[in-house]
Image (cartoon, rainbow, N blue to C red):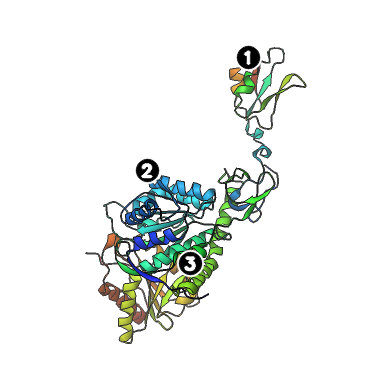
């Protein structure tokens, strides 16, 4: 969400979205954030597959996973699915 | 604009509506039959079957689906029409708000009928009055000719880029829907040219492009998104603005149509009858106006200064017009063919009395609830209302602000 909100005269007709949904940061909804134990993590990518917000991605340059906290809502599915219990949900 | 030669067809109100839709180059009709609207759907499906129209006719399983289909069709840029009555309109309730909120210019004929229980298939305005806050423009026809004319005008009003709101055309169940009348119809070509093709305002999309306001895979936009406390209010405020903008456009479209057809219904918003010097006046909607006019003539022949104000457009409410029309009347009798249970009188009474409050010297206003469930409203009953108004003028006070006319004690 942009910090400055527009008035009704400046909003497109019927509230047609004037910005893509990626500009609406939903990461501040979370209470718990996933914290990964890099030693335990086997990079199996199951967390990335299960993440409902696409907030976990494989970075080929770093050859590692990246958590995007701008969109992670802290649902904890990644922690639940991790087969080696490498993700812990910590209070933000 | 020159008057067009017209032919006269013997049609009832439903047939007149179907005929108007047939001529209005409608892309999609989705409807579910319900008495007394059924004839509209029947006739129109015959036009489709006979290849007389180039319209996609969608048979649906309910009115909720009928309006949803029309909304979806309208969102992709089609011209969409549906028709319903009573319980059917009530079942559409949710989607009425979605349609107006998405600014989809769907046109719907509402053949006004009472709501259950007890089950009743006859005329009153409870169905449409229950939806007066749904964001739809509401126009009530006095006769089948006006129903025909209003449906054609409705497409132009709804689709006007300053308006983009859905329109309901109300016609009284059975009194109009099932009563044969001589209806003058314009040539197909004239109507087609009058309604034209839909125009789309440009909106800025999430890709930063200015694109037509319709769902198009080539130029994607999102219509009807989630908007919470941060934006919902602003979007609703836009709707109210569109309603205000619709007032002059309804008049403008009505004038333009009158130039072709030679038919006028007041100024398109209000239709005043012998009101200029009236001391007592009735206010009503729909077909009752015909009976009231007869009574006004009778009273006038006896030297009683009676008049009538018929509200043709109820939403948006033509507040200034109502105020000006009734400013010099001494007593106003508002007739409501619907009851707002537990309220102070009927819905039309609420609005009219409310509008007159701002006048420096305001007329007395009383309310007469009549004709529920199709109860016949005779000239005698209308006389009773005018007698009451005369008494109000004489005594300079309203003894009973809300009365029920034609109900047995």
Q: Is residue B371 left or right of residue B194?
A: left
Q: Secondary structure at mark 2?
A: loop
- The residue that mark 2 highlights is B61
Q: Nearer the viewer, residue B93 or B155?
A: B155
Percent coordinates x, y for residue B213 in the rendering? 60, 51
* Residue occupying the point 52% across, 57% down: B165
Q: Kindly report the distance in space between the C-alpha atoms of the residues bearing marks 3 and 1.
A: 74 Å
Q: Residues within 10 Å of mark 2 (few under 14, many from 20)?
A: few
Q: Residue at x 69, y 32 (%)?
A: A70
> x, y percentage for residue B59?
39, 45
Q: CA distance from mark 3 to mark 2?
A: 35 Å
* Label 2 to label 1: alpha-carbon separation: 50 Å
* 2 or 1: mark nearer the eye: 2
Looking at the image, which residue is at 36% across and 66% down?
Answer: B144
- Please, which chain is the residue tagged with disc 1 on? A
Question: Which residue carries the number 1 mark?
Answer: A85
Residue B158, image x, y percentages: 51, 59
Q: Is residue B400 left or right of residue B108?
A: left
Q: Nearer the viewer, residue B357 or B62?
A: B62
**What kind of element bears circle 1?**
loop
């Amino acid at each position: 969400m942009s910090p400055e909100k527009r008035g009704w005269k400046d909003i497109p007709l019927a509230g047609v979205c004037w910005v893509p949904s990626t500009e609406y940061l939903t990461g501040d909804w979370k209470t718990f954030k996933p914290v990964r134990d890099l030693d335990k993590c086997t990079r199996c990518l199951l967390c990335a597959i299960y993440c409902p917000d696409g907030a976990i991605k494989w970075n080929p340059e770093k050859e590692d996973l990246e958590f995007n906290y701008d969109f992670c809502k802290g649902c904890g599915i990644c922690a639940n699915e991790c087969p080696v219990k490498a993700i812990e949900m910590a209070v933000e | 604009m020159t008057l067009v030669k017209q032919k006269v067809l013997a049609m009832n109100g439903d047939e007149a509506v179907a005929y108007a839709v047939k001529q209005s180059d409608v892309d999609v009709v989705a409807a579910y039959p319900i008495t007394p609207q059924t004839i509209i759907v029947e006739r129109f499906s015959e036009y489709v079957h006979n290849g007389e129209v180039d319209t996609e006719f969608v048979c649906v399983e309910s009115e909720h689906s009928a309006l949803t289909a029309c909304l979806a069709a309208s969102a992709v840029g089609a011209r969409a029409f549906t028709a319903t009555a009573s319980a059917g309109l009530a079942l559409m309730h949710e989607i009425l708000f979605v349609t107006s909120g998405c600014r989809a210019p769907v046109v719907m004929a509402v053949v006004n009928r009472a709501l259950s229980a007890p089950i009743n298939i006859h005329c009153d305005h409870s169905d449409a009055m229950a939806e007066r806050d749904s964001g739809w423009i509401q126009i009530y026809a006095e006769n089948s000719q006006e129903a025909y004319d209003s449906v054609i005008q409705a497409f132009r009003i709804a689709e006007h880029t300053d308006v983009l709101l859905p329109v309901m055309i109300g016609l009284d169940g059975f009194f109009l829907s099932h009563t044969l009348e001589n209806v003058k119809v314009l040539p197909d070509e004239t109507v087609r040219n009058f309604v034209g093709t839909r125009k789309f305002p440009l909106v800025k999309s999430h890709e930063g492009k200015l694109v037509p306001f319709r769902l198009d895979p080539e130029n994607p936009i999102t219509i009807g998104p989630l908007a919470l406390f941060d934006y919902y209010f602003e979007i609703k405020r836009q709707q109210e603005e569109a309603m205000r903008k619709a007032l002059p456009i309804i008049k403008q479209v009505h004038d333009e149509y009158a130039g072709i057809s030679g038919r006028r219904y007041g100024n398109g918003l209000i239709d005043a009858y012998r009101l200029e010097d009236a001391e007592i006046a009735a206010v009503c909607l729909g077909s009752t106006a015909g009976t009231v006019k007869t009574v006004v003539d009778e009273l006038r022949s006896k030297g009683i200064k009676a008049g009538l104000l018929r509200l043709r457009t109820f939403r948006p409410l033509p507040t200034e017009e109502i105020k000006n029309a009734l400013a010099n009347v001494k007593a106003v009798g508002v007739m409501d063919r619907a009851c707002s249970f537990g309220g102070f009188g009927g819905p039309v009474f609420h609005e009219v009395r409310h509008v007159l409050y701002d006048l420096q010297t305001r007329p007395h206003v009383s309310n007469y609830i009549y004709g529920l469930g199709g109860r016949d409203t005779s000239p005698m009953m209308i006389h009773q209302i005018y007698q009451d108004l005369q008494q109000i003028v004489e005594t300079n006070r309203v003894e009973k602000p809300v009365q029920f006319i034609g109900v047995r004690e």
